[in-house]
Each structure stands twice: as C-alpha cells, then as structure tokens.
C-alpha cells in the first residue's frame, strides 16, 4: 500500500501549487499513470478521497488518465504497443526494446478557482488600488 | 525531477505540453495549471542527495529487494564473511520480517543501522538519508540496504543506490518476473537464491526465470546461488567487485576532472 505514501506526496504538491497560484480551491486534479509505475490507480483514488478532506482540494475530483505501454525496438526501430509483462517488439518480436511510455506517475494539471482581487474588492477600494498602482 | 529539462515528457503525455504556457482559462471560469510533476519528485531529490553522499566517499550502495524470506539477510551474512577481510562493509537494515536482522549482521563484525519503518511496506530516500548519516562513510567501501520484504512497493522508491539487486528464491516459483514486472524491470542483477533446493523443487527452471526476465526487456544478469551451501557465491562476489571498481574509476575521473579544471 505505497499508494498512501504516493497520495501524501501528491497532496503536498497540490497544496503548494494552489498556494503559489493563490487559488481559493482546487476543483480537479489530473494524473497520468502508466501500469509500469507500480501504482494501482484504484488504490490511489481511495487514498485521495481520504486525504483531500479538510484540504484546499476537499471538493476536488481526481481524474486519472491510464497511459498506454509503448515500446520502441532496438533492432527494427519500430514503435509498438505492449503488455506490462511482455515488452517484446510487436513488429519483429525482439526483446531488446525501450519503454517510451507506461511507467509515468505524474501530476499533469490542476483546475483551480480563484477569485481575482478585482472581483473581491469593493468598487471604491478598487479605485483606490488603481490610484496606488498609478502612483 | 525536472520542470525544465523535459525528462518528464513521454510519448504518453507529450500531447499535454502546450506552447501557450502554464495557465489557461476554461469556459466555466476555472483555471487550468499545467504541471507535469513526477509524484515522487521529493523522494527522488533526496535519493539524488544520498547518491552524492555515497559518490563523494566512493561508497558503493546496493539496494537488496525480494519477497519476505527469500534470503536477503542470509546472503548478506555470507557476503560479509567472504569479503570482510578485504573490504569495509556496512548494512542499512530495513526489513521488518525478522526484528533481529541487524543483530544477525552485527554478529559478523560489521555495523548495521536498523531503520524502524513502523508499519511501512517499503523504504524511502528520507529513511535512508537519516540512516546513512549514522555511518562513517569515509571508512566504508560498500553499503548494503536491505529493503522491506515486498515485491511491490520498494521498486517505486529510489533510495540513492547505485544498483538494485533482486532475489528470487527457488521456492517462490520461476514465473515471479512475469507477476511482478515493475520490481524485476528495476533490477540491475537478479539472484536466484536457495539454489541448493533446486533438486527437490524441480518445477523451478532457472531458464524460465531468465526467459520471463527477457520478456520484460531486461538485460540484467541472472546468477544462481545458495547462501547456505555458498555454491555460486563467486559470480556474485565478482559482480560486486566489478561494480565497486567501476565506481572508483568514475570518481577517479571526476576527481581528476575537477583538479584540472
Ligand atoms: N535452503 C536454503 N535456505 C535458505 C537460504 N538462504 C536463506 N535460507 C533460509 O530462508 C529463511 C529466510 O532467510 P532470510 O535470510 O532471513 O530472508 P530475508 O527475509 O529475505 O532476509 C531462513 O530460514 C533461512 O535459513 C539458502 O541459500 N538455502
Ligand atoms: Mg531479512
Ligand atoms: Zn510500500
Ligand atoms: Zn522490432
Ligand atoms: Zn531531468
Ligand atoms: Zn545529507
């Protein structure tokens, strides 16, 4: 169950990016996970629904894109799809291949809601601010 | 690890890298922030820091992984006995299965730091960092890290080791690489352990284990050995010495380069 540890790392990243972007809340978190990352998306999802409580992402949905396993062949140079435990070239059958996709474990993007200073501010304060900016 | 060098961009996610930059507004007033961070970046940074510590002192760091009871501690005991007159060895002990692993190691006359992982099912780079600062690295040649007995999670966490060594013991069956591709793909060397049991457990075929490993596109060498009878230990010891000397070459070249610079 290292998905708990992975989820904790995810929450730290989400919170620090939300802070950096001055977001009021995070509404969606998009991950890309390949089967060779060793992380079980379903378990990560369960961990996320527990971990998000009380955080800036308390209402956020988690969207996981399951990335495909793709390999490129050292022998024939072709790229093909493969199964996680069978990384043989789909064209010539050679086992000397390189993974080009399938071991990702990434935070791809987040969707935030941010009330801008202008929207928040009273009209007068707004004018005041603009004066200050001019000065 | 890197937001700048593009190493997080793969075939599978390249479509997400947009030229317009990091922020874009969606129709419903939400803002999308492009990130593309590895989720284990923080661990990987600490691992890189650990590796610098090891490199600075020319210490070879080996991460031993396997299922519980595959023979990691026994292999370490036999390895220490074979090498302790020539080399200075220490062990970072993270296996929970037997609480006394560290004392088993110390009984062979080498320092062992026990990581108390609580209920953790893997070691991470932070735990190893704390442990390595309890060792006198300048006096050591090899540090072995005995990971938690588990074929799943330990493979996802870089510790700062130079090589991963995965044990597959004969009683476990020869198809383990097909069942745990993430672990076996991460292995730089696979040791088929408890080979003294091959005559009794004759459904274990070392060639099948090798074939399953090749199907993971791994070119890692596979050695057969027994810590109990010490048969096959030579290949493993030679592999270790070769790793150590290539590390010394690298750090020698590095030192020469910095001197001449
Ligand atoms: N037959 C045989 N048994 C072994 C060998 N190596 C370890 N064992 C036994 O396997 C069990 C687990 O070994 P241990 O080294 O503690 O495994 P670990 O959990 O991976 O550290 C112990 O009972 C050992 O005596 C071996 O080479 N041959
Ligand atoms: Mg042990
Ligand atoms: Zn774990
Ligand atoms: Zn091919
Ligand atoms: Zn990079
Ligand atoms: Zn340090």
Image: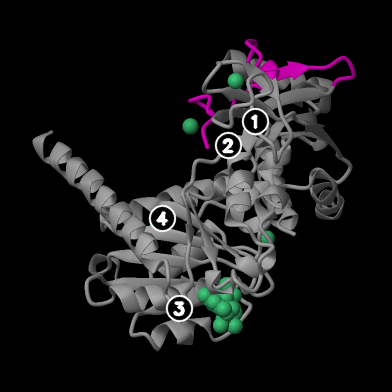
Q: Position of residue B142 (x, y in %)?
A: 33, 64
* Left or right of residue A8: residue B167: left
Disc 2 secondary structure class: loop
Between the residue at mark 3 and the residue at mark 2, the CA separation in whole angstroms equals 31 Å
Residue at image mark 1: A88
Q: Which residue is under mark 2?
A: B217
Residue at point 65%, 75% (across, down):
B118
The answer to whether mark 2 and mark 1 are in CB contact below 8 A is yes
A113 displayed left or right of B136: right
Residue B2, given in percent of the width and then of the height, sits at: 51, 32
Which of the image's four quarters has the C terminus of chain B?
top left
Q: Is residue B14 magenta?
A: yes
Q: Nearer the viewer, residue B135 or B98?
A: B98
Circles 4 and 1: CB atoms closer than 8 Å: no
Displayed quadrant of residue B166: bottom right
The disc label shown at residue B50, or none: 4
Task: Tell me which segment is drawn in magenta.
Answer: B1-29
Q: Secondary structure at mark 4?
A: helix
Instruction: Give residue B175's position: percent from left, percent from top.
Output: 69, 54
Ligand 1 within 8 A of label 3's CB? yes
**Ligand 4 positioned in quadrant:** top right
Label 4 beta carbon less than 8 Å to ligand 6? yes
Q: Residue B235 occupies which quadrant of the picture?
A: bottom left
Parent chain of label 3: B
């Amino acid at each position: 169950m290292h998905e708990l540890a992975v989820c904790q790392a995810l929450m730290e990243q989400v919170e620090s990016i939300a802070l950096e972007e001055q977001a009021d809340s995070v509404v969606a978190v998009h991950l890309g996970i390949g089967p060779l990352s060793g992380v079980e998306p379903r378990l990560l999802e369960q961990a996320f629904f527990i971990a998000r409580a009380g955080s800036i992402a308390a209402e956020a949905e988690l969207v996981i894109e399951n990335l495909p396993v793709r390999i490129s062949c050292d022998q024939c140079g072709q790229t093909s799809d493969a199964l996680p435990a069978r990384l043989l070239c789909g064209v010539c059958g050679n086992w000397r291949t390189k993974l080009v996709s399938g071991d990702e474990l990434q935070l791809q993007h987040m969707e935030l809601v941010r009330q801008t200073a202008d929207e928040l501010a009273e009209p007068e304060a707004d004018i005041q601010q603009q004066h200050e900016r001019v000065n | 690890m890197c937001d700048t060098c593009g190493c997080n961009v793969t075939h599978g996610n390249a479509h997400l890298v947009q030229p317009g930059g990091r922020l874009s507004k969606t129709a419903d007033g939400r803002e999308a922030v492009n990130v593309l961070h590895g989720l284990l970046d923080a661990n990987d940074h600490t691992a890189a820091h650990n590796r610098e510590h090891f490199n600075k002192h020319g210490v070879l760091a080996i991460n031993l992984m396997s299922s519980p009871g595959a023979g990691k501690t026994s292999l370490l005991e036999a390895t220490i006995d074979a090498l302790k007159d020539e080399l200075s060895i220490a062990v970072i002990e993270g296996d929970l299965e037997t609480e006394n692993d560290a004392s088993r190691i110390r009984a062979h006359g080498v320092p062992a730091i026990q990581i108390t992982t609580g209920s953790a099912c893997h070691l991470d780079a932070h735990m190893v960092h704390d442990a390595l600062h309890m060792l006198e690295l300048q006096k050591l040649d090899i540090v072995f890290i005995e990971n938690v007995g588990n074929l799943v999670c330990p493979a996802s966490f870089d510790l700062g080791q130079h090589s991963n060594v995965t044990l597959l013991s004969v009683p476990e069956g020869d198809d383990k690489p097909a069942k745990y591709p993430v672990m076996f793909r991460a292995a730089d060397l696979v040791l088929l352990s408890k080979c003294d049991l091959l005559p009794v457990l004759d459904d274990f075929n070392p060639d099948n284990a090798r074939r399953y490993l090749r199907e993971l596109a791994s070119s890692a060498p596979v050695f057969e050995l027994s810590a109990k009878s010490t048969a096959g230990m030579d290949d493993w010891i030679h592999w270790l010495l070769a790793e150590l000397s290539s590390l010394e070459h690298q750090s020698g070249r590095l030192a020469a380069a910095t001197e001449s610079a």
